[in-house]
Image: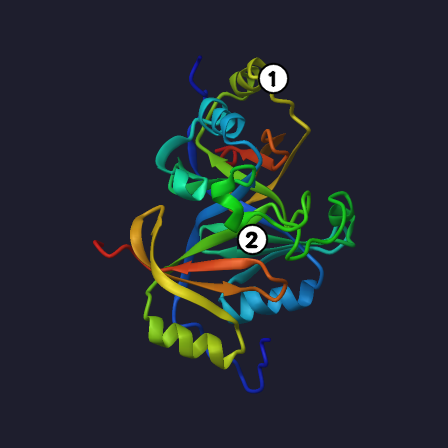
Amino acid sequence: MSEAPFKIKGLDHIVLRVRDRDRMVRFYCDILGCTMEREQAEIGLTQVRAGHSLIDLVPVDGKLGRMGGAAPGKEGRNLDHFCITLDGYDEAKIRAYLSALGVEIGEAGSRYGAEGEGPSLYVSDPEGNIVELKGPPWHA
Amino acid sequence: MARVTKKAAKPPFTLEGIDHILLLVSGMKPAVRFYTEVLGCTVEEALPQYGMLQLRAGAALIDLVDIAAPQASWAKPPVAGGRNFDHLCLALGAHDEAKLRRHLARHHVEIIEEGVHGGSRGESLSLYVRDPSGNVIELKGPPPA
């Protein structure tokens, strides 16, 4: 079999299907610190920046969202979770910060990611998507 | 959640990017063939006890979880066919577009949509394909120099 005529550099963006755009923007921008990149209300697309990647929010009742079928729920999903790399990881501070904002925090642990094994914890976004927040690898 | 009563504090961290994504697939064999032979991912680690396979996609990982396998019952959603994410976009390095199209055709991978629009690196051509489980993958090169 011939080799692919390209190399993958990494993940550019992921597109989440959302019910409540404003609530999700508050979570990703005000709480996690994403920045607003671009808004295309006419097609129902909000793009926020998470470091070198983008997270796109597509309301399921918008033009783009309607093409993707019914709204997602905890019960039906094709994405288990996604993980964002953090620059700086002080678990106590992150916990205090997130719990003050009412964010549901899951299990913390040492987990394997693209840069190696390092500390991480899981949080839930307002619509039940699991977001893993991961610090730099232990050996860095 | 998110009861912000006073001026919100700044997060005690900055975001670097998406590290990995855990995708649900149905049937590991066709999924692996697609992600390794068609897309060129490499196997990082097999975790059969969880029905999982970790693949490297450049700087990131794509973890596949085979919800058809009994070991992956932990990840299996109660309702089949639901989608909480619309698609995933892979950042490709510079490449020859004609060769990319021929490569996909040779693997019988259909381009379901295409267009020039913005990604994290700027505007460039995107080709959309489906993995064997129906997850939509956007293939996006760098913006023209």
Instruction: Check disc 1 and report the residue beneath it.
Output: B108
The picture places residue B65, in percent across and down from the top left corner, at: 49, 41
Please tell me whether mark 1 or mark 2 is closer to you in this view.
1
Q: Is residue A111 visible?
A: yes
Q: Residues within 10 Å of mark 1 (few under 14, many from 20)?
A: few
* Residue B91 in the image, given as x and y percentages of width and height: 48, 37
Assign a secondary structure to mark 1. loop
Residue projecting furthest to the bottom: B6
Looking at the picture, tell me which residue is in the foreground, A39 or A134: A134
Marks 1,2: beta carbons within 8 A? no
**B3 or B13: nearer the viewer:** B3
- Coordinates of residue A129 in the picture (x, y in percent): 57, 58
Q: Which residue is mark 2?
A: A55
Quarter of the N terminus of chain B within the rendering? bottom right
Q: Residues within 10 Å of mark 2 (few under 14, many from 20)?
A: many
Q: In the structure shown, which secondary structural element does the residue marked by tag 2 occupy?
A: strand
Residue type at mark 1? His
**Do marks 1 and 2 both belong to one polypeptide chain?**
no
The chain holding disc 1 is B
- Left or right: residue B40 versus residue B78 is left
Which residue occupies 74% across, 56% down?
Answer: A41
Residue positioned 64% across, 34% down in the render: B134
The three-letter code of the residue at mark 2 reads Ile
* Residue A12 visible in the snapshot: no
How far across and down, in percent of the image, does residue A89 sit? 33, 66
* Residue B89 occupies quadrant: top right
* Above-or-below relation of B1 to A54: below
Tell me if residue B99 comes above or below residue A55 in the rendering. Answer: above
Q: Residue at x 52, y 80 (%)?
A: B8
- Of all residues, the one furthest to the left in this rendering is A139
Q: Residue at x 44, y 77 (%)?
A: A97
